[in-house]
């Protein structure tokens, strides 16, 4: 009798875990930035939309800089990053589930699913505003502004 009870309990935990995983990934994936359909690059936006997680780091000497965005707690941090043309951005996944970095419009950012401890890097060679999200969790959103 003990064996069937344990199997039912394990199955219930797995079902609840999957339900939580899929519910945590639901959200609005609409972008409020205009897209330049010729290049797949979003046009610059002047609004920070009240977001306090803006990082304004830059390239002052004209040489490329590296910037890090951490994925943790189903969020990109910083949510908004300002960089210079030619800079490299690396997204590092610190969550226990897989994530992607996917352009809201165009195909500039298009990572495969990467898991805990993995990272994805991209060099930005054109000015513009690049909005992105995570495919499995579309409520996760970020923005890179290249000047």
Image: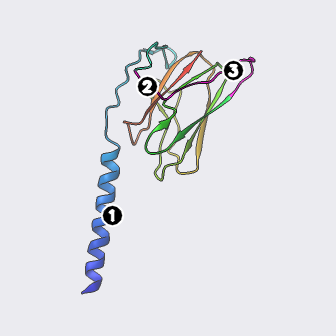
In the figure, residue 5 lies in which quadrant? Answer: bottom left
Residue wearing tag 2: 51
Where residue 114 appears, as percent x and y from the top left, is 53, 46
User: What colour-coding does the image apply?
Assistant: rainbow
Along the line of sight, the residue nearer the viewer: 111 or 16: 16
Looking at the image, is mark 2 or mark 3 earlier in the sequence?
2
Residue wearing tag 3: 59
Relative to 115, does residue 109 appear above or below in the rendering? above
Looking at the image, is mark 1 or mark 2 earlier in the sequence?
1
**Who's the residue at 75% across and 18% down the image?**
61
Quarter of the image that includes the N terminus: bottom left
User: Please, what is the dominant secondary structure of the magenta stretch?
Assistant: loop
Q: Is residue 27 left or right of residue 130?
A: left
Q: Residues within 10 Å of mark 2 (few under 14, many from 20)?
A: few
Task: Quote the CA–CA distance across marks 2 and 3.
Answer: 22 Å
Q: Secondary structure at mark 1?
A: helix
Q: Which residues are magenta?
A: 50-65
Does the magenta portion include 52? yes
In the figure, residue 27 lies in which quadrant? Answer: top left
- Residue 14 is labelled as 1
Quarter of the image that includes the C terminus: top right
Q: Residues within 10 Å of mark 3 (few under 14, many from 20)?
A: some
Badge nearest the viewer, 2 or 3: 2
Badge nearest the viewer, 1 or 3: 3
Where residue 54 appears, as percent x and y from the top left, is 51, 26
Q: Is residue 109 left or right of residue 57?
A: left
Task: Quote the CA–CA distance across marks 1 and 3.
Answer: 47 Å
**Who's the residue at 37% across and 20% down the image?**
32
Q: Secondary structure at mark 3?
A: loop
**Who's the residue at 43% across and 15% down the image?**
47
């Amino acid at each position: 009798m003990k064996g069937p009870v344990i199997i039912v309990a394990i199955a219930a935990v797995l079902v609840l875990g999957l339900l939580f995983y899929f519910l945590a990934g639901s959200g609005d994936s609409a972008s409020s930035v205009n897209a330049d359909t010729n290049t797949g690059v979003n046009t610059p936006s002047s609004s920070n939309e009240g977001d306090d997680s803006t990082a304004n780091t830059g390239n002052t000497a004209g040489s490329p800089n590296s910037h890090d965005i951490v994925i943790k707690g189903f969020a990109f941090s910083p949510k908004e990053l300002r960089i210079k043309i030619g800079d490299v951005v690396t997204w590092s996944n610190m969550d226990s589930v897989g994530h992607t970095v996917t352009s809201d419009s165009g195909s500039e950012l298009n990572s495969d699913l990467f898991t805990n401890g993995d990272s994805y890097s991209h060099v930005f060679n054109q000015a513009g505003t690049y909005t992105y999200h995570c495919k499995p969790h579309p409520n996760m959103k970020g923005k890179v502004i290249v000047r």
